[in-house]
Amino acid sequence: MRNKIFGVFAALIVTSMVLAACGAPATEAPKPTEAPVVATEAPAPTAEPAVEDPMAMYAPDAVSGDILTAGSSTVFPLSERMKQRFEEEGFSGNLTIDSIGTGAGFERFCKTGETDISNASRKIKDSEVETCKTNGRESIGFQVGIDAIAVVVSKDNDFAKDITLEELSKIFTTAEKWSDIRPEWPAEPIQRFTPGTDSGTFDYFVEAVTAPFYKNADGKADVKAGKQAILDSKNTQFSEDDNVLVQGVEGSKYAIGYFGFAYYEAQADKLNTVAVEGVVPTEQTAEDGSYKLARPLFIYSDAKIMQEKPQVAAFIYFYLNNVNDEIQDVGYFPASDAILQASMDAWNAAVGK
């Protein structure tokens, strides 16, 4: 009996062990090892090639050397302002501007070849163009603004407020007394102050005022006769220095003179302008031509000079791009966008751009 119980007990133990083995969880096979992920950077963008500025070579701080200019006393203060700006922007060379009159300026530029730029208060004459060509220069004009010649009297003058072109011609030629112009005006000698014969202002005045009243055999304005009439007038002082003219006019009730509008504005507290044909000089009347004594302002150079001397081309380029920022402060009137664009086109053609 004891052995039988022992056998049953043993059988139970074996059975338990078999059941335990069957219920044990199976061991999972190890998962295959995945290849490590390596982060791949996107390729760096290809840098765009730098675009070279074709105008960089004409920047004020990119050029050096000498620039010689001479000519109109009217253009002088405007060129002086542009010189100041050009130097402030980095030009370290020598820029010389001489105020000697338009005619004398063209002589230095065309005849003797001393200058790189000629300042002018009128267009270059055909004879001056030919002189330039004879000496190997092709003059190129760049209009930079508009001036109006101001006819001025002193603040003490209370009678000459508006005159016609014909009266103005007589005032600077044959009339001796103010009463010769209008009987109601004082019977006092006219004291005349005029720019000198080398001045573009003088040349323009002759062409616009006196020559039309001195006809040649063909009935056309005789510039030579109009000029001589002024030279033969009495009580007349000539000067290339507009400041001398200002001082002369402001010193006498019976004096009269003419010069660039800028010089009038600088002395407006001492002088009065005289209307011509009922119109006084203003920006609008100068631009639309209703003021009869308005005229263009120029600087002239030569393509060969501009190509051989980048500093000259650079100054003209700077002048054209910045002149309208300064011109009214100096006392002149700005040229229109179309005029300045035409000047810039001439610049591009000259330097081959």
Image (spheres, grey):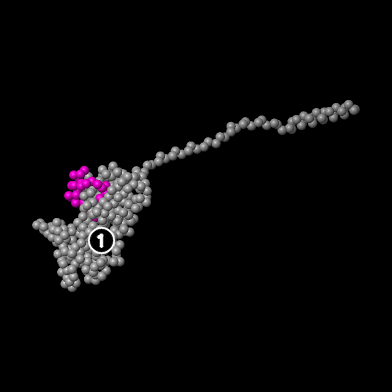
* Snapshot quadrant of residue 237: bottom left
The quarter of the image holding the N terminus is top right
Image x and y of residue 187, in percent: 17, 71
Along the horizontal axis of the image, is 198 left or right of 33? left
The percent coordinates of residue 39 (x first, y second) are 55, 36
What residue is shown at x 23% (from left), y 57% (from top)?
A: 240
| Tag 1 residue | 244
Residue 298 lies, in percent from the top left, at 25, 53
Question: What segment carries the magenta color?
Answer: 111-136
Residue 115 belongs to magenta span: yes
Query: Depth check: 79 or 142 in front?
Result: 79
Foreground of the two, 31 or 154: 154
Residue depicted at x 25% and y 58%: 241
Q: Is residue 55 magenta?
A: no
Can residue 246 be seen here? yes
The answer to whether residue 344 is left or right of residue 127 is right
Residue 235's image quarter? bottom left
Question: What's the amino acid at mark 1?
Answer: Val
Q: Position of residue 146 (x, y in %)?
A: 26, 57
Camera sees residue 321:
no
> Is 163 located above or below residue 295 in the figure?
below
